[in-house]
């Protein structure tokens, strides 16, 4: 059964001088019950316009949208709240407006309180909330609306701290498991890979690619890498939801001696001492190497390695061996990361915090040295 359908969808805004501007044009897709669609694209690509059309916030200039069932928006968490009402009162008002009454409304408010985790602030006026607290309340109200058949999400995966972001993702997973159809726009490609079956890449208001999430997101990520001269990705730093603590990271050579410099073609040994602070099932553990200007060189992880599956709790040492490292001479930085089993959110991510150098006298250009030969032959008649 098709729950969401968009056919030749377009939105035009009047322009001055240069004529009208199409924010979206020629976009179409269909979603059955329980499927999740990721919507990706750079700023200005038409993502928010598409979500507004799906929610009915604005009307299309051409084409049509059909939604079978009730929809709820996580596009603007908190829209429609009143600043003088408390979190509880806003949640109650939302429940009553959705058609609930009596005990059902009270149960809905209790669920909102549990999801938002605002503590005593739940009983305070909204005007006393920070922006992050208001977004938490808005997400909780929408996430508790279990009667919705379609949930439309715009960057809610960035709400609050790492812990609450994980809660957001888990709630969306639960909704999908119950048959809710999801449309999610986000820049968090890791989360989208774990949540979505299909993906739509918008570029300049048009559909650049539509298909299986893994293929579309890989193509979009490659597009972003090609623009690396303009944007080098996130700055070095630490983040994560906190279930894993990285205790120590040591860079060593093949003999196990700590190094800050490695000869060209040598073996790099990355030893990561970590502690799982609670039981974690089959975490994805990874080590990545970046050039010091931010170029992503290589980043393998343990996803799919059954021998490393199992439940982790307590202290461990992860060792990654990069044998006969083919990187050219220069300065590099190591990242280490621990993700949930679906590779959606990071328990701990130390990004580009562990530097080392590759030493060598040869003058070569690029990032890696590939095995090669040159052959020159005389061509008769030339």
Image (cartoon, rainbow, N blue to C red):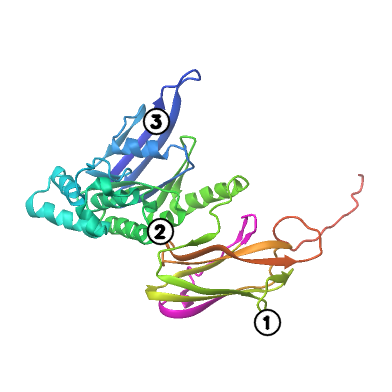
- State the mark number for residue 10: 3
Which of marks 1 and 3 precedes in the sequence? 3
Q: CA distance from mark 3 to mark 2?
A: 29 Å
Which of marks 2 and 3 precedes in the sequence? 3
| Residue for badge 1 | 255
At x 7%, y 51%, the residue is 102
Is residue 133 visible in this depiction of the protein?
Answer: yes
Image quadrant of residue 80?
top left
> For this view, does 344 lie left or right of residue 261?
left
The residues colored magenta run 290-319
Mark 2 surroundings within 10 Å by alpha-carbon count, few (fewer than 14), some (14 through 19), many (20 or more): some
The mark closer to the camera, 3 or 1, is 1
- State the mark number for residue 194: 2
Is residue 1 visible in this depiction of the protein?
Answer: no
Which of 151 and 295 lies nearest the eye of the viewer? 295
> For this view, does 35 lie left or right of residue 46?
left
Image quadrant of residue 258?
bottom right
Which of marks 2 and 1 precedes in the sequence? 2
Image quadrant of residue 11?
top left
Q: CA distance from mark 3 to mark 1?
A: 62 Å
Q: Is residue 89 above or below residue 337?
A: above
The mark closer to the camera, 1 or 2, is 1
Q: Residue furthest bottom?
A: 255
Q: Residue 159: image x %, image y %?
A: 36, 52
At x 65%, y 62%, the residue is 332
Q: Is residue 171 magenta?
A: no
Mark 1 surroundings within 10 Å by alpha-carbon count, few (fewer than 14), some (14 through 19), many (20 or more): few
At x 9%, y 49%, the residue is 101
Q: Helix, strand, or loop for circle 1?
A: loop
> For this view, does 73 lie left or right of residue 86?
right
Q: Residue furthest top?
A: 17
All told, the count of numbered labels is: 3
């Amino acid at each position: 059964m098709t729950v969401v359908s968009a056919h030749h969808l377009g939105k035009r805004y009047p322009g001055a001088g240069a004529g009208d501007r199409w924010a979206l044009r020629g976009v179409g897709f269909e979603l059955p019950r329980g499927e999740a669609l990721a919507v990706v694209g750079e700023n200005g690509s038409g993502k928010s316009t598409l979500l507004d059309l799906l929610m009915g916030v604005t009307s299309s200039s051409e084409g049509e949208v059909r939604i079978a069932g009730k929809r709820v928006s996580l596009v603007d968490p908190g829209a429609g709240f009143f600043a003088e009402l408390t979190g509880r009162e806003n949640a109650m008002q939302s429940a009553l407006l959705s058609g609930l009454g009596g005990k059902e409304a009270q149960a809905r408010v209790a669920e909102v309180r549990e999801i938002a985790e605002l503590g005593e602030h739940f009983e305070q006026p909204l005007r006393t909330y920070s922006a992050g607290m208001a977004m938490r309340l808005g997400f909780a109200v929408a996430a508790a609306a279990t009667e919705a058949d379609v949930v439309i999400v715009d960057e809610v995966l960035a709400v609050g701290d790492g812990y609450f972001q994980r809660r957001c993702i888990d709630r969306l997973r639960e909704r999908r498991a119950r048959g809710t159809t999801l449309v999610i726009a986000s820049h968090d490609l890791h989360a989208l890979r774990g949540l979505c079956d299909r993906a739509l890449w918008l570029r300049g208001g048009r559909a650049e690619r539509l298909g299986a999430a893994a293929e579309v997101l890989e193509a979009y990520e490659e597009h972003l890498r090609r623009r690396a001269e303009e944007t080098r990705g996130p700055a070095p730093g630490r983040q994560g939801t906190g279930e894993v603590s990285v205790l120590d990271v040591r860079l060593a050579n093949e003999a196990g001696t700590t190094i800050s410099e490695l000869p060209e073609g040598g073996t790099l040994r990355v030893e990561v001492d970590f502690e799982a602070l609670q039981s974690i099932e089959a975490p994805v553990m990874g080590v990545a190497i970046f050039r010091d200007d931010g170029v992503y060189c290589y980043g393998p992880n343990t996803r799919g390695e059954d021998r490393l599956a199992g439940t982790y709790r307590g202290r461990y040492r992860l060792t990654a061996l990069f044998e006969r490292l083919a990187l050219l001479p220069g300065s590099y930085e190591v990242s280490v990361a621990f993700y949930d089993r679906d590779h959606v959110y990071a328990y701990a991510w130390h990004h580009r915090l562990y530097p080392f150098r590759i030493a060598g006298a040869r003058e070569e250009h690029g990032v890696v040295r590939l095995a090669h030969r040159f052959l020159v032959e005389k061509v008769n008649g030339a």
